[in-house]
Image (cartoon, helix red, strand yellow):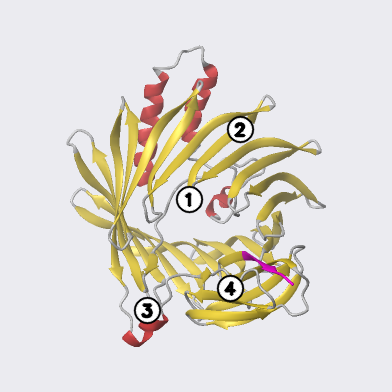
């Protein structure tokens, strides 16, 4: 419902902007028309399939700054659960906020979301719309996501995702099925492969043709010596061989911040520039700008950009969306976030710039609740997954590495040399929620720069250390 409000508002902007642009300025008109296209996935492959839109893990040409609040948040040894979200639209005539939709979250004793209940506002009351139900295995990994619609006073199955994991809790398969004729029908599945460092190296996408799985496309991932993703190579299967169709290339600064994301299209045996994202950061590592450009007539042409501001606690407070019209940036939308004293996000206000003023469009309000746990367990609550700087550094011959595990999961902590070769395995087992200290004795190891890397579920971080003799 919020998307509809935003889309309608953007279309209003488009109509009003048309009146301000000369009829001979076709290039600018094209940019205005393309504003609403930013809200759609633009697949750069002729044989794309609508089912791709249902796989949220797939990288698409456009990046969307749809910022979603995490269902749960841990702060100062206390877990806060987002129990509801309410979306409202602005009635510009009555000058009041009108209910649109809401989500109510239900959790299990581990703080995992078990249900999302979506309701719509029907003039004077909330009515059921749809719900998501989640199931987890003994490790707390999500193994199923079921979607149902409320039809004729009962819940009706729509589709579901099923997930499989390896011994290190890496997700190895994601299966998507739809409910048809009172049974689950396979639609597609995605299979992932990982290397010994926990990096995903391959994603294989297959379709179900009612009899067997048919290979459709794959993505191959490449990393640098710092374990940062440097390339995503997409290839389609033409029944006999793999054929490239696009690739992403990433570059980073000395702090590991992503500086550029370049997309190229495979055309007549060569990769041709298609689009590019460039990122800027402040001294704290907060992203302050994301610039989007398209390759046109052998040059990069500005398209749009987002700029971001933060408060003293590094919480994002504002986001401005600008479009390049003619030879200048024009601001179109703004999102503003507010937080409570526990730094839980309480409101997101979406506004549109029109006639030199910000006009309200929609508002999201969030309600939080503290998770009540057994007092004896409070000492084991860890605020987040983390990997601390080793101490001492530089060192000879030993150093201490501290890391925190937010929830029970399989953990590996390895040391690599500057060429990416594994030097030492410090941790390789399932760890419970706690803070851990590990000592690495580098006796016999040559002087130089080394990297230590933790993989704990979806948390991955790498830090640098120096051995001196």
Mark 1 = which residue?
A: 286
Disc nearer the start of the sequence (3/1): 3
Question: Which is more foreground, mark 3 or mark 2?
Answer: 2
The residue at which mark 2 appears reads as 294
Label 2 to label 1: alpha-carbon separation: 25 Å
Closer to the N terminus: mark 2 or mark 4?
2
Q: Which callout, 4 or 3, points to the residue nearer the camera?
A: 4
- When the figure is inspected, residue 105 is found, relative to residue 109, above or below; the finding is above
Disc 1 is placed on an element classified as loop
Verify CB contact (< 8 Å) between mark 3 and mark 1: no
Q: Give the residue displayed 56% in from the left and 62% down from the top.
A: 176
Query: Looking at the image, which residue is at 58% across and 66% down?
Result: 460
**Disc 3: which residue:** 109
What's the CA distance linking mark 3 and mark 2?
Answer: 48 Å
The image quarter in which residue 229 lies: bottom right
Q: Residue at point 41% right, 68% down?
A: 133
Residue mark closest to the camera, 1 vs 4: 4
Secondary structure that dominates the magenta span: strand
Q: Is 251 left or right of 334, judged from the image as shown? A: right
Q: Is residue 67 above or below residue 293?
A: below
Which residue position is annotated with label 4? Answer: 391
Circle 2 — which element? strand
N-term-proximal mark, 1 vs 4 = 1
Identify the residue at horizontal 50%, vertical 64% (top origin): 160
- Magenta span includes 464: yes
Q: CA distance from mark 3 to mark 1?
A: 33 Å
Q: Quadrant of the C terminus?
A: bottom right
Q: If you read the primary sequence from the N terminus, does the residue marked by circle 3 or circle 2 appear first?
A: 3
Residue 353 coordinates in the image, percent (x, y): 34, 31
Task: Give the magenta part as a residue range.
Answer: 463-469
């Amino acid at each position: 419902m919020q998307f509809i409000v935003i889309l309608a508002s953007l279309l209003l902007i488009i109509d009003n902007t048309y009146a301000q642009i000369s009829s001979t300025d076709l290039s600018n008109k094209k940019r205005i028309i393309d504003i609403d296209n930013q809200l759609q996935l633009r697949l750069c492959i002729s044989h794309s399939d609508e089912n791709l839109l249902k796989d949220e893990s797939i990288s698409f040409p456009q990046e969307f700054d749809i910022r979603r609040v995490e269902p749960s948040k841990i702060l100062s040894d206390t877990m806060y659960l987002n129990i509801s979200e309410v979306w409202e639209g602005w009635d510009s005539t009555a000058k009041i906020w009108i209910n649109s939709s809401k989500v109510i979250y239900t959790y299990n004793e581990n703080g995992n979301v078990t249900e999302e209940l979506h309701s719509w506002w029907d003039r004077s009351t909330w009515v059921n719309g749809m719900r998501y139900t989640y199931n987890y295995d003994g490790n707390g990994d999500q193994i199923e996501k079921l979607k149902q619609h409320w039809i004729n006073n009962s819940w009706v199955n729509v589709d579901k995702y099923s997930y499989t994991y390896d011994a290190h809790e890496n997700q190895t398969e994601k299966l998507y099925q739809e409910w048809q004729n009172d049974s689950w029908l396979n639609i597609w599945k995605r299979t992932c492969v990982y290397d010994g460092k926990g990096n995903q190296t391959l994603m294989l996408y297959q379709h179900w043709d009612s009899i067997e799985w048919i290979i459709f496309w794959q993505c191959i991932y490449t990393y640098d010596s710092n374990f940062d993703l440097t390339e995503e190579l997409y290839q389609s299967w033409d029944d006999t061989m793999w054929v490239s169709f696009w690739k992403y290339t990433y570059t980073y600064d000395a702090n590991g911040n992503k500086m550029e994301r370049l997309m190229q299209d495979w055309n007549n045996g060569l990769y041709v520039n298609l689009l590019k994202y460039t990122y800027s950061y402040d001294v704290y590592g907060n992203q302050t700008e994301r610039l989007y450009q398209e390759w046109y007539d052998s040059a990069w042409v500005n398209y749009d950009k987002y700029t971001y501001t933060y408060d003293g606690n590094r919480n994002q407070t504002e986001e401005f969306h600008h479009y390049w019209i003619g030879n200048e940036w024009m601001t179109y939308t703004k999102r503003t976030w507010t937080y409570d004293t526990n730094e839980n996000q309480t409101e997101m206000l979406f506004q549109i710039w029109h006639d030199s003023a910000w006009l309200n469009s929609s508002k999201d309000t969030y309600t939080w609740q503290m998770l009540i746990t057994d007092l004896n367990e409070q000492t084991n609550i860890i605020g987040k997954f983390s990997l601390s700087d080793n101490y001492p550094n530089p060192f000879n011959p030993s150093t201490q590495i501290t890391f925190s595990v937010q929830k029970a999961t399989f953990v590996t902590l390895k040391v690599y040399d500057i060429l990416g070769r594994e030097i030492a395995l410090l941790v390789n087992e399932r760890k419970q929620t706690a803070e851990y200290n590990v000592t690495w004795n580098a006796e016999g190891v040559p002087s130089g720069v080394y990297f230590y890397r933790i993989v704990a579920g979806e948390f991955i971080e790498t830090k640098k250390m120096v051995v001196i003799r």
